[in-house]
Image (cartoon, coloured by chain):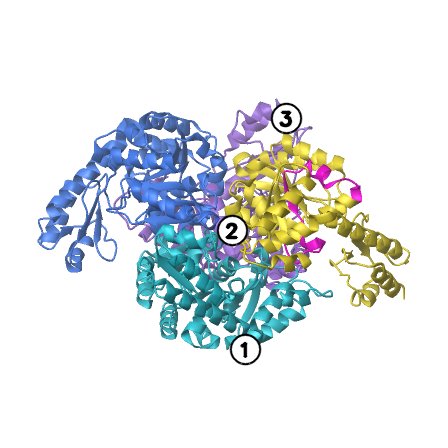
Chain colours: A yellow, B purple, C cyan, D blue
Amino acid sequence: MQALIDANHGHMPSYGNDTLTKEADDLIKPALGRDCEIFYVYNGTAANTLACKSVLRSIDSIICPDSAHIFTHEVGAPANATGSKIITLPATDGKITPEQIRIAHQKETYWGVHATRPKLVSITQSTEWGTVYTLDELKGIKEVCTELDMLLHVDGCRIYNAVVSLKCSLAEMCQHIDILSLGGTKNGLMFGEAVVFFNSEASDGFLHLRKQGLQLHSKMRFISAQMKALFTDQLWYHNAKQANLMASQLAEGLILHPEIELYCPVQTNQVFVTMPDKLAKQSMDKVGFFPNGPECYRLVTSFDTTEAEVSQFLFLINK
Amino acid sequence: MQALIDANHGHMPSYGNDTLTKEADDLIKPALGRDCEIFYVYNGTAANTLACKSVLRSIDSIICPDSAHIFTHEVGAPANATGSKIITLPATDGKITPEQIRIAHQKETYWGVHATRPKLVSITQSTEWGTVYTLDELKGIKEVCTELDMLLHVDGCRIYNAVVSLKCSLAEMCQHIDILSLGGTKNGLMFGEAVVFFNSEASDGFLHLRKQGLQLHSKMRFISAQMKALFTDQLWYHNAKQANLMASQLAEGLILHPEIELYCPVQTNQVFVTMPDKLAKQSMDKVGFFPNGPECYRLVTSFDTTEAEVSQFLFLINK
Amino acid sequence: MQALIDANHGHMPSYGNDTLTKEADDLIKPALGRDCEIFYVYNGTAANTLACKSVLRSIDSIICPDSAHIFTHEVGAPANATGSKIITLPATDGKITPEQIRIAHQKETYWGVHATRPKLVSITQSTEWGTVYTLDELKGIKEVCTELDMLLHVDGCRIYNAVVSLKCSLAEMCQHIDILSLGGTKNGLMFGEAVVFFNSEASDGFLHLRKQGLQLHSKMRFISAQMKALFTDQLWYHNAKQANLMASQLAEGLILHPEIELYCPVQTNQVFVTMPDKLAKQSMDKVGFFPNGPECYRLVTSFDTTEAEVSQFLFLINK
Amino acid sequence: MQALIDANHGHMPSYGNDTLTKEADDLIKPALGRDCEIFYVYNGTAANTLACKSVLRSIDSIICPDSAHIFTHEVGAPANATGSKIITLPATDGKITPEQIRIAHQKETYWGVHATRPKLVSITQSTEWGTVYTLDELKGIKEVCTELDMLLHVDGCRIYNAVVSLKCSLAEMCQHIDILSLGGTKNGLMFGEAVVFFNSEASDGFLHLRKQGLQLHSKMRFISAQMKALFTDQLWYHNAKQANLMASQLAEGLILHPEIELYCPVQTNQVFVTMPDKLAKQSMDKVGFFPNGPECYRLVTSFDTTEAEVSQFLFLINK
């Protein structure tokens, strides 16, 4: 917020040719540890959609987990924008394996011109189920992509939580990625995400694509100012660390309840539990946690979740 | 072929305003037994794709079996043309149930504006695995569509074989269908299929859509002449009957071989068997049957398959 | 800005189900004077593109001036998103007439199924050349739309300046509009515009469309808070009035220079002049006004342009 | 027709892997005089649309005459399929100049990321007005394309008539072309056209694109058989020569009438004249010529137009 107030003074060139955007770039690139190009957009769906559109033709296809946000929660935006087919794989706790990718590739290309050309693997890190690919798992997926002449896109709207969870650096994570949707909103920004290309060919025409994709903010400095703030003094790290810690405390408290069970491992800031609806109702409405899905509940902690809030929630549940 | 030779004489109005097209319509409509509109196109992928495009917006979705030709074998054309999401259901022998459709609808709409609006169910009759929905099964699917405010599209590139198999009439089959891709090429035509709308709202703008969809044949009489021939003296029936009969004889012969097993029931003109590659090789190359898929073999009989050909094939297999 | 700071406190429901969004709606609707639905999006290109997409099929077309932003400056986004054809008419000072629309409609529909169905007229108010359609002119265009079964979309990113110029009310202006892109960014907002549907059928599915169109802001309150501020105490009016006044003073000063001529009438906050490049250079770089186009210069005043800035600019020009 | 009857015997591999398709290729390639790839499709709109789609992204644009069939008569199919913008230039007798292309390119690219990247010039030879680009004019257009990093597409549905008119060879014509829509239907085929790529990069993925574009004929031999016939003993040349000759005789006769004037030069098989509606009516209905457009009449001769038909037409006009 303070970053926005500062950005609000004086006149500046429009459409990203401003000092703040350059400063944000200069701060983020070293953190990612590799030569890359960064493009700011409004939200995560846009980052994912335009990342896909930048490298796919309508005859190509995307291989992703069946839990992928790009398939389940974006009203089909990525497929709609690219015209490409999405091939979903059954995910275990939100994750897929190199072997699954290889088989899916074989099955699709078996049909030659009657089927599509798989060109992009898209995974989410941390996943929609709050789990995390290890660095070795990421490397394995990247290797099968290279082998099959595919690119690897990572939906990183919660990548910071994965980095904290793995106790690695953002740079180590990015080693295995071709195109990254770099999160912002879910880490405290008012709005703003970024598409990062580590593969320079992939970004051809992206400036045009961003404008056509309804994502060119005339007052771009208001996005970059926030992203800059997020990367100043590793704010992203502290935000993610706090969120992960609170989720861990929350999970520890929840499993003590006899009627509550963890749905999948808690590795970041999302806790999935099964519990009776009645139990959920007496707590959800009163605290800043949200129900999710028809079968289980999803509790998301954020950078500003406090221990007191967690305690209050656990108190209400156990009442 | 004779129909084409006849159609080749004299000058006629272009783009479907000709006598032959009217005559074909007048012959086909009574056979389908309901008020409808018929539009001729070049091939089956086009019929399916434009049928979908005529009723879907990009925010809508299609529910279909995971074996559906529109999903697996058309390079994503229907999704590409409509911008709509395709929701696939695990099919049993190529078929899906009303209950599967209801659950898929619930799951998708649970997410509100983050997901799509399921608007079309698309099934294939006879299916990609040669099986057939009974009239009751069709009725059940149509009922769940009505309940959920969806339309029912049937990919009928092999609908004639299903009619023969069910010993019903085309009219009985069409009772439960909103939009039909009516086959031609797979029943002996040189080229040509039709999109049939039993729901008149669904066809709004289809003439424009056909032209934009690259399917307006300037010399339309060459398609309608063939469709007319197919419906003259129930030629389609005799063609389908012969194809089904030959498939049945083929299947009976094949199962006598100790190393061959039927993969799914033989109800129309497609026989799916598992057999050693070596066995397949000694017969396939020499006769007009085709291998299919990485795991099993698909043998398709047609209107001009003879008992002699079936016998020769069985002889080679058993050698 | 203050509105944003206020919106930044506490947790609120996401995706527009918040109090601020309701409050903004309650303030804007009376100002527009008609029953309507309002949807907030990030920017003007998005408002225009999704407005078009909400009512057009790929076989339809848009009629607009050849100077229209939707045609010239949005990398083809509206046509890309809709798949529809754009039919441009030669505009006089950015404006088109009912008669031009009628003729264009006739010419296109003459070709029947070989051409598109014109379904939407899109004009800009105030125009890209800073001029304004009178209320009578608007009414005339709306009448021809009704006659030809077309809808009227108005790109109103600068509609406030037109209202001030015409000395009418926003409500009077909206009487003749079916779908309005209601400006925000160009009137001082950090980001945010709205699509307003006066025709309720036109908005079917728009919530899905907004999400698919990459415009669903999870923290929607940050847009609505700004729009609410814009409509509190008629801030939009005061902003537009100041901008128009400064443009008028600027124009009066400029025409005194022997080498400068007005390119078109100055009716709002945009001044188009022809002048030698050399003259332009000695002033542009030093003050917050911008060159535009290869042949003429475009000077845009805004809500925070001061008399001192105008004087300084004129001083530099006349030096 | 005879070619089709011959093609109708025996079983053959589907989807273009047949002997006839290879034979057609072997006959056509030498005639075109350059290394190239040939893909058969159903009709001219498809050839044009897929030619564009093979080389354009949604952020690119096409520059073409405002009379281009791809803009006026294909329900926007090329723009719809590519998502690309079409920039039309005022054509003189259906033709545009290198200088017009250069200016249009400058104007569009002036706006940087707010506008599109012009990547393809598309012209028609012979044009929609029956006129012909000379070889020098073609060369000039190709040169400006090369200079501006654009490709040149030629809609050649009537290229044979242009070759006859210029008294050159097909090979000389093709020297200056990157992608050619090679006509069939308008030269006597029942159906079938071809897309020819002289630029091998441009054809990447075209086999998939053809299937997705609803143009993969399972019984491809029925198209290639006709194309082969067209190129056997230069049948195309004799067809086009006869058509051109008849048009020339027709034009000579028409201009003798005091109320008839040529609308543009007659260089191929299309004659455009202005004449009173009454005059038109007394002849059109009775002979195989067709009215066209709201302001003028278009008379098209074909390979099977006879001198007797021309005489009869002239007799009825002069009655």
Q: Is residue B240 visible?
A: yes
Residue that appears at 51% across and 51% down:
A211
Where does the image place residue A50, in percent across and percent down from the top left? 57, 47
The amino acid type, in three-letter code, at marker 2 is: Lys
Q: Is residue A242 above or below residue A132?
A: below
Front disc: 2 or 3: 2
- Disc 3: which residue: B277
Residue A187 included in the magenta stretch of the image = yes
Q: Which residues are magenta?
A: A165-192
Q: Position of residue A180 (x, y in %)?
A: 64, 43
Percent x, y for residue B59?
56, 57
Quarter where residue C4 is shown: bottom right
Identify the residue under disc 2: A211
Under tag 3, what secondary structure? helix
Q: Nearer the viewer, residue A170 or D43?
A: A170
Residue bearing mark 1? C30
A7 left or right of A270? Answer: left
Q: Are marks 3 and 1 on the same chain?
A: no
State how far apart marks 2 and 1 are (Cα).
33 Å
3D distance between C-alphas at marks 3 and 1: 75 Å
Determine the residue positioned at 79% across, 45% down: A165
Task: State yes or no: discs 3 and 1 in contact (Cβ < 8 Å).
Answer: no
Chain letter for mark 3 = B
Q: Is residue B207 above or below residue B260?
A: below
